[in-house]
């Protein structure tokens, strides 16, 4: 027990979440346990509305579990944590700030050294291909560009854990693939632990070391798929691999089973 | 003249010729009504006579205009500051919101013209009752628009702010308040026009200076040209104050203005 606490980046231990609505008490998550190793990339898939996002909110401390406990970087989560980066489906950028200043919001809120933060922001802008768009306002950027800004903002303070809640869900298929390739590269360059909630089976397998398949509400862990792919992954080569095909087929089967063949 | 500048002027002309034409048409109709003798001259003076009087009595009107403008601006500024403070308190405290709302609504619903005499009884014929009526008129739209603005902030943005750990003050200064500014400005624009009305109403009830006083005097003397002149000056004061706020909005919120499209269109839609 203590062994897992010190070696896991994220440890979710027998967690349940119940919401009280007007009519009844709804159990969103039921006795879910999950350990994520430092530097690991874990994808979470499951039927719509099963509580995937709730899981990320638990890890970030934006939500408190009804029972069970969540441990982040060896410290139990009680209230919002500041040692994470969060990316939502919508970029959630401040309309009046340029791309660069949106990224630097992270630094300003944290009271980081301005010069250092500026240097780090420029690094990230370079890394995510935002160069030339530093001074553009959010409404002048495409959806993919906006999401890159959100990613840079989430990485500015070098968080050891990055939480992503369907970050590419609103993008078109081609942009999404490009973003997948970039996220893969960023993950390799930063060595950050990533928890990604997604609806895309291909995305979940391409990016992750492990894919957690959740069931319908109340969500329990249905199966954990170990992704047997090389560390560095070329996009089309990975898609063509038999391991990729078998993993996606397995997940598709599982999701079909949990959602009732639809 | 370079091309960019020429284009800019063409844009200005394209946007402003319609309202200018409408204004000219109104003046023409006014002129026709009086010139044809459709309405007696002592009831509706001709535009020529009215503007002639405006020019003749300019120094007299200027002094009174200054008084009314001063009351208006003072009332507007007090209402603006108070309104924002009350709105912030209401957004951050459920208790304050539920406690203050009925009183606020009551203060808004009560006819200001009916309670204005009371302020004269309490505070005399000086500046105070006019400013108070102006504040009362302008306060409500500021509160409502600021509350709406502060509440319109994305919940995801606030969650994000929580993970950044800046605390409530930084979250307010860097995220919530700037996000509320477009709403706040909409409220301020309504408020400034109401503040003019408030100041004039205050002057009606008891005053020996200001444009409200000028109109009341002219009314008593059946001096319709002066009455019309007073009305025109009041309207011009209101429009100028409104335009000043519109300009401030464009300078402070270029990101918002650029998303709304042509400025004059919105100005006409709101004004």
Image (cartoon, coloured by chain):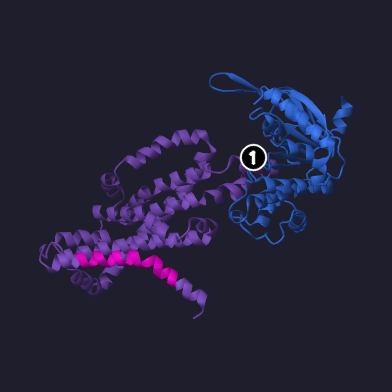
Tell me, yes or no, whether the highlighted magenta stretch contains residue B253: no
Residue in the picture at 40% in, 57% down: B74
Tell which of A160 and A37 is nearer to you.
A37
Q: In this picture, is B50 found above or below B216?
A: below
Residue A182 visible to the viewer: yes
Chain A palette colour: blue
The colour applied to the residues of chain B in this rendering is purple
- The image quadrant where one finds the C terminus of chain A is top right
Examine the image and state in which quarter residue A230 appears. top right
> Is there any visible trace of residue A17 in the rendered image?
no
How far across and how far down the image is residue A234, in percent? 82, 47
Disc 1 is attached to a residue of which chain? Answer: B
Q: Which residue is drawn at 88% across and 33% down?
A: A7
- Write down the region rendered in magenta: B10-29
Report which quarter residue B210 is drawn in.
Answer: bottom left
> Mark 1: which secondary structure?
helix
Q: Mark 1 points at which residue?
A: B159
Relative image position of residue A128 (x, y in whole percent): 75, 53
Where residue A245 appears, x then y in whole percent? 80, 35
Q: In this view, does B13 lie to the left or right of B176?
A: left
In depth, the one of A31 and A50 nearer the eye is A50
Which quadrant, please, contains the N terminus of chain A?
top right
Question: Tag 1: Cα neighbours inside 10 Å, few (<14), some, or many (≥20)?
Answer: some
Q: Which secondary structure class fits the magenta region best?
A: helix
Q: Position of residue B194 (x, y in %)?
A: 35, 52
Count of numbered tags: 1
């Amino acid at each position: 027990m203590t062994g897992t606490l010190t070696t896991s980046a994220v440890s979710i231990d027998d967690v349940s979440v119940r919401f009280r609505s007007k009519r009844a008490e709804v159990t969103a998550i039921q006795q879910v346990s999950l350990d994520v190793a430092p530097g690991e990339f874990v994808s979470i898939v499951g039927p719509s509305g099963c509580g995937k996002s709730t899981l990320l909110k638990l890890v970030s401390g934006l939500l408190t579990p009804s029972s069970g406990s969540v441990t982040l970087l060896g410290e139990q989560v009680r209230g919002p944590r500041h040692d994470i980066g969060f990316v939502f489906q919508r970029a959630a950028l401040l309309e009046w700030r340029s791309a660069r200043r949106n990224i630097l919001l992270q630094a300003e809120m944290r009271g980081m050294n301005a010069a250092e933060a500026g240097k780090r922001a420029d690094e990230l802008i370079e890394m995510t291909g935002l160069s030339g768009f530093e001074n553009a306002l959010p409404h002048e950027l495409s959806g993919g560009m906006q999401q890159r800004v959100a990613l840079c903002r989430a990485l500015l303070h070098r968080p050891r854990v990055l939480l992503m809640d369907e970050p590419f869900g609103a993008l078109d298929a081609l942009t999404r693939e490009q973003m997948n390739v970039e996220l893969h590269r960023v993950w390799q360059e930063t060595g950050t632990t990533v928890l990604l909630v997604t609806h895309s089976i291909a995305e979940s397998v391409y990016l992750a070391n492990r894919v957690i398949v959740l069931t319908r509400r109340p969500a329990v862990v249905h199966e954990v798929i170990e992704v047997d792919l090389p560390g560095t992954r070329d996009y089309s080569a990975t898609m063509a691999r038999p391991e990729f095909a078998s993993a996606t087929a397995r997940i598709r089967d599982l999701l079909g089973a949990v959602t009732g063949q639809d | 003249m370079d091309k960019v500048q020429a284009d800019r002027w063409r844009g200005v002309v394209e946007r402003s010729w319609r309202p200018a034409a409408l204004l000219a048409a109104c003046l023409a109709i006014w002129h026709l009504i009086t010139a044809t003798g459709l309405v007696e001259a002592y009831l509706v003076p001709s535009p020529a006579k009215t503007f002639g009087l405006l020019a003749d009595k300019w120094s007299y009107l200027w002094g009174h205009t200054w008084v009314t403008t001063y009351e208006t601006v003072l009332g507007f500024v007090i209402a603006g500051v108070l309104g924002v403070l009350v709105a912030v308190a209401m957004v951050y405290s459920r208790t304050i919101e539920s406690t203050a709302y009925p009183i606020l609504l009551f203060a808004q619903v009560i006819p200001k013209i009916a309670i204005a005499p009371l302020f004269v009884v309490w505070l005399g014929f000086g500046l105070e009752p006019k400013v108070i009526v102006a504040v009362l008129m302008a306060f409500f739209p500021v509160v409502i628009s600021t509350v709406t603005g502060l509440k319109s902030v994305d919940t995801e943005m606030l969650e994000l702010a929580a993970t950044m750990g800046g605390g409530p003050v930084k979250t307010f200064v860097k995220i919530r308040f700037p996000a509320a500014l477009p709403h706040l400005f909409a409220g301020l624009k309504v408020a400034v026009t109401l503040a003019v009305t408030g100041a004039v109403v205050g002057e009606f009830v008891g005053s020996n200076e200001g444009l409200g006083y000028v109109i009341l005097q002219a009314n008593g003397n059946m001096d319709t040209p002066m009455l019309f002149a007073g009305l025109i000056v009041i309207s011009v004061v209101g429009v100028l104050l409104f335009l000043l706020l519109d300009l401030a909005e464009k300078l402070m919120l270029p990101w918002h203005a650029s998303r709304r499209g042509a400025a004059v269109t919105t100005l006409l839609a709101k004004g």
